[in-house]
Amino acid sequence: MVLVSADYHRIAAADQLRSFAGILGMAYESVESPAALAQVLRQHAGKELILIDTPGLAAAEMDQGQDLARFLAGRQECDTHLVLSASMKSADITRAVDRFQIFRPAKLLFTRLDETESWGLILSEAVRMAAPISFLATGQHIPEHLEPPTPSRLTGRCMRPARRRRRR
């Protein structure tokens, strides 16, 4: 297994991911262009799993991700997961999904589920996008808090009434 950082925008992203790869016992590579990413993918073609971390881009920065998006969208072997915070407002999640369509994500991965009581919007967005949910992150300890979604887990949380706040 290999962890590849294609996030050359965020300061210290490479160091953080290098440490994470070490903890998981994975090889680590850092690239600064789609051409370099193509070379790393060729070099590790026989590996069981290659995880590629891409930059999280704000709306004003999307032009910086165009080349990487075109590269990944054109690779059939890449299974692109769009990572979103479940604690975002519904309109913000929709806007983010629409903005990142240039990457042609096939799946959604939701983080920060421990920070929200409402899981309905993640199902709504998955339905709107016609994309499956690949994983749920329910805390900050990865991989312990990363879990595959199950129908009972998703529907159970969506159907559960919100907790009432106690008055003091």
Image: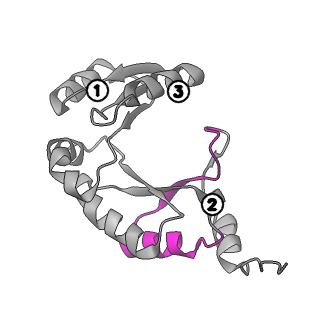
Left or right: where does residue 135 sit relative to residue 108?
right
**Type of residue at label 3?**
Phe
- Numbered mark located on residue 115 in the image: 2
Tell me where residue 120 appears, x and y as whole percent. Answer: 57, 75
Among the 4 quarters of the image, the one containing residue 111? bottom right
Q: Earlier in the sequence, mark 3 or mark 1?
A: 3
**Type of residue at label 2?**
Glu
Tell me where residue 52 appears, x and y as whole percent. Answer: 37, 35
Do tag 3 and tag 2 residues touch (Cβ < 8 Å)?
no
Q: Nearer the viewer, residue 12 or 35?
A: 12
- What is the C-alpha distance between the residues marked 2 and 1? 35 Å
Q: Which of label 2 and label 1 is nearer to you?
A: 2
The residue at the point 51 percent across, 22 percent down is 19
| Residue 113 drawn above or below residue 55 | below
Q: Earlier in the sequence, mark 2 or mark 1?
A: 1
- What is the C-alpha distance between the residues marked 3 and 2? 23 Å
Characterize the local packing of mark 2: few (<14), some (14-19) or many (20 or more) Cα atoms within 10 angstroms.
few
Q: Earlier in the sequence, mark 3 or mark 2?
A: 3
Tell me where residue 84 appears, x and y as whole percent. Answer: 45, 57
Q: Is residue 125 magenta?
A: yes
The residue at the point 42 percent across, 20 percent down is 28
Is residue 47 visible in this depiction of the protein?
yes
- Which residues make up the magenta segment? 117-143
Quarter of the image for the C terminus: give it. bottom right
Q: Secondary structure at mark 2?
A: helix
Q: Which of label 3 and label 2 is nearer to you?
A: 2
Q: Secondary structure at mark 1?
A: helix
Q: Is residue 122 magenta?
A: yes
Residue hosting label 1: 41
Residue hosting label 3: 20
